[in-house]
Amino acid sequence: MRTPLVLTLAALGVASTAASASAQFMRFGDGCTGTAGELELVLAPGTTVTGSTQLQVHDANGSPATLLLGFSRVFPGADLGVIGMPGCDLYVNPTVTLPMPSVFGTPLVTLDTSAAPPCLEFYVQAASIDPGANQLGVTTSNGATIALDPVAETVLHVATVANTAANWTDISEPSIDGEPGAVVLYTHDWTASGGSYLDHATGIYYVDEIDQWSIFNQDIAPMPLGHAFHVFLPNSGATQLVATKDTSQATGPWVEIDDAAINGDPNAMVFAVPVWNPNGQPGVYHDAHVGVWYDALTSRWTVFRQDQSNMPDGASFNVVVADANLTTSQDAFLHVSTAGNTTLNRTELSHPELDGNPDASLIVCQRYGPGFAQYNDQAVGVYYSPLSQTWWIYNEDPATSMPVGAGFNVLLGEPLPRGSNWTHVTASGNVVGQSTRIDDPALDGDPSAFFLTTQRWDSATSVYNDHTIGVWYSGATDRWNIFNQDIAPMPVGAFFNVLVPNSGATKFLATATPASITANYMHLDHPALNGNPDAFVFLTQNYSGVGVYNDHEVGVWYDSLADRWAVFNQDLAAMPNDASFNVLVADERLSADSRPFGHTATASTISNHLTVIDHSQLNGDPHARVIVTKSWRNGVYHDDPIGVYYASGQWRIFNQNFDPMPVGATFHVLVAGDCQ
């Protein structure tokens, strides 16, 4: 039986698209034991999560099963022993149930995801009739997350005091946090690094202690603060793998890449970087510069050492192929250094999507082949020249000339018209007075850009910032900033969650006028909000609207007499004329995997200055990006700067000044999706 998921989603009010999507299938929890063994929900053999997903249940005692499908999970799992199912847990809040008929003793169901909306995430679990298993005669399987991710992603990472130590810098990116099997590429960027060189062979590795990826110097040299990297994260359907040198391969300066997608294809666009511990395996250092090369004798691509020394056994490399499976609007091309485009230690790129585009993102991999058979035993990076308005590839050792005839595969990582979310950390290099500068391609150079921010505390490195915040744009630096409204110095080590919504989201700049102001509040006038008391509204103060400070904690409330939402000052101070706010409505136009909900601080959730959020979209996820706006529903004012932090499996909202959290304080909470 084939059950089209897209029809199920349409019935639930989730819009579909015509584009196909790739996806990830990620198990969590355990099944309970029945008469035939532990019940397991798995992908059917040979199934890929592209276009359609076939699921099957193991050890169901030959009985049919039922698939529970929902858009939120139960964490860590609800104990079903209370209803006669000891040892079984419920992991999914089911929105629909789908039959899984038994085919030759194995329950099966096929979900059609070919027209599902981009970035959708949902949860599944199976249940099966098993009369001898327990009192109720029902068993349940493990849970699983199915996450659609139809596009690749490129982000800019900068080494700061907060994320850098010794020879490494930690990457905080929600789409790969907690994913030791992720395949990640990166390239140095001299321009974003402020003109600093990094003349070392580098690699990438997964840090179990913090569940994040890190870029490191292979020779253990200190990682310089301020150095920047373009980081590329392929979609799960892309041709990607880890190539590892083992004893079965001949001794030589290379490791063979064996993949049907590129075997026998000398024109493939292959990109590779060293990875120290792929999928958590033991690591091998590889202090050498590498490139890719097609071996016509074996019809295989290889990763090779530019210095021609033997490749050590166990050396591993992340490999991504820029082919039709790389579902992205980005482009890849071959660049060869010539006498006409090369000077000193650099070679100039020429491409219509790069020229005049200083905000572009590039991934570069050295390549050796016919017509470009020159070794370049150097670390390389990229930079943008404002003088020529072009991008260049350069040797990190400025004294080493770029050879004529060197080849490079270049992948363009032009920012896509999607949103993004990340954590900004204040450091000595980005703090001036009461402000901290944000560097991100989604915002840089755009004074009309829209984003929200919420303070965050991280138990490892954070500091408190007991001040009301806002955002403003500096024309002098062409950068956005987060600032303290009372002009107090911005501390180093403060964390901020930042959300740039997708381009189609319902968002606008609201500015207070005499006509909209009444005492301490201003009415909002927008068709998505008017007459809609159940809307989820989020905001951040924006000084750049007209240029007015409002050093007061704010919130939102629905004025039922006017059928309008309003922004108000919590301390009842008069709302100043021209005060401006970035306002986001979390409706169906927001990316499909972003989830809004309400939270009320009650006696059972409050502990001194904080309130614990118990919600399936957040529980167990320390890497979530949480945006919070105060709301007013119970007549309780809350005039304290707040932040969010994670501990013991759950998120909390806390008062920065340690004042008691008031009972009845209410909040709008938004879990920003990985795929904005």
Image (cartoon, grey):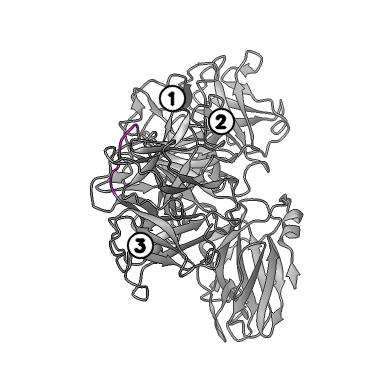
Q: Distance between the residues labelled 3 and 1?
A: 41 Å
Q: Name the residue under label 3.
A: 277
Pinpoint residue 325: horizontal percent, then vertical percent. 59, 57
Pinpoint residue 608: horizontal percent, then vertical percent. 39, 42
Which dot, 3 or 2, sits closer to the camera?
3
Chain part drawn in magenta? 194-200
The type of residue carrying mark 3 is Asn
**Kind of element beneath mark 1:** loop
Q: Name the residue under label 2.
A: 450
Residue at left offset 61%, top offset 31% = 557
Which dot, 2 or 1, sits closer to the camera?
1
The magenta stretch spans residue 186: no
Judge whether residue 570 can be spotted in this image: yes
Residue 250: name its quadrant: bottom left
**Kind of element beneath mark 3:** loop
Q: How far apart are marks 2 and 1 (CA)?
A: 30 Å
User: Which disc is residue 387 wearing?
Assistant: 1
Pinpoint residue 575: horizontal percent, then vertical percent. 55, 18
Label 3 environment density (alpha carbons within 10 Å; few <14, some 14–19, many ≥20)? many
